[in-house]
Image (cartoon, helix red, strand yellow):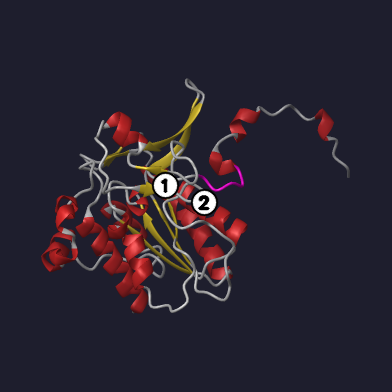
Amino acid sequence: MKINYNNAAPVDSKFYLHPETSYEIEPSTLYFKKNKTYYLTYAEEHDQKLEIDPRVEYKLNNFAHRCDDFAEIDKDKTNILFAGCSATFGHSLPEKYIWTKKLYKALPFENKGPFQSIGIPGAGIEKIVSNILKYCHKFGNPDYIFIAHADFSREVVYLSETDQFINKIHLDYETYSLEDNKDFYLMFRFQLLYRLLEIYCDSHNIKLLSYSWDSITLDRVKPIFPITFIDQNKTLEQHAKLFDYDSVDSQDKDFLVSGRDGHHPGIIHHDMVFNLFLSSLKS
């Protein structure tokens, strides 16, 4: 039977303008442009009103991400993709201390593809999974995917009063309580999207390893995804006692606990995540 689409009700195109509904890889932030170098994000420049720090350079690639240019995967090489939120982007830190860059350099593969990282500040499970699949669709499937997830409460919502899509965080980080009684819905949504990513990776022989810096998310998902979701074996305090402080350049000592904005994780946290992924991969 042939369907006559000419008689179909008109569709309001604005509902299809959100980046996640397109086939294009979303940039690290809408504030950044491709192939540019910045020293402040929008939040640092406008919301927190920070001064430029030349140590923290955001050098962006051909898709406005903080890594080497995205290119078609060379199947003769071992290809690695990193994904996550601002902790993966390395917000407020020099690139050399970010867990993704440290892990990329330490992975024991002789012939590695370029450093590829999709870190989006503020991203939740929707943005993370959608951008991974878009990357695979456009450039091919990597051999390994490493993800540092944010908390499960992040959700893309539409605000009719402002006619905008926003990335809403339902978790109150001070009280660790969820607003709007959306606990079950948000966790179910996280499970669903992550399970679909697991299935995709399994069917394409991609090795997937994930972690969440949020303890609530980690406690809830690790019994559900025991194979691909890893738990931290040391608390940050324990790791800090073992951290090699001599590995940090003297001028960067003020980044040990937090980044330039005083909010995002610092060098010690990134080192813990690096060690967590590396030890899990080896075992």
In the picture, the disc for residue 131 is 2
Which of 261/196 is in front? 261
Q: What quarter of the picture does the N terminus occupy? A: top right
Judged by its main secondary structure, the magenta piece is loop
Q: Secondary structure at mark 1?
A: loop
Q: Residues within 10 Å of mark 2 (few under 14, many from 20)?
A: many
Query: Circle 1 sits on which residue?
Result: 120
What is the magenta range? 22-26
Q: What quarter of the picture does the C terminus occupy? A: bottom left
Q: Residue at x 46, y 51 (%)?
A: 128
Which of 50/176 is in front? 50
Q: Residue at x 32, y 53 (%)?
A: 217
Q: Residue furthest front?
A: 54
Q: Secondary structure at mark 2?
A: helix
| Residue 229 falls in image quadrant | bottom left
What is the C-alpha distance between the residues marked 1 and 2? 10 Å
Q: Residue 70: image x %, image y %?
A: 53, 57
Circles 1, 2 touching at the beta carbon (< 8 Å): yes
Q: Is residue 74 above or below residue 1?
A: below
Report if residue 243 is visible in the image: no
Q: Earlier in the sequence, mark 1 or mark 2?
A: 1
Report if residue 19 is visible in the image: yes
In the picture, the disc for residue 271 is none
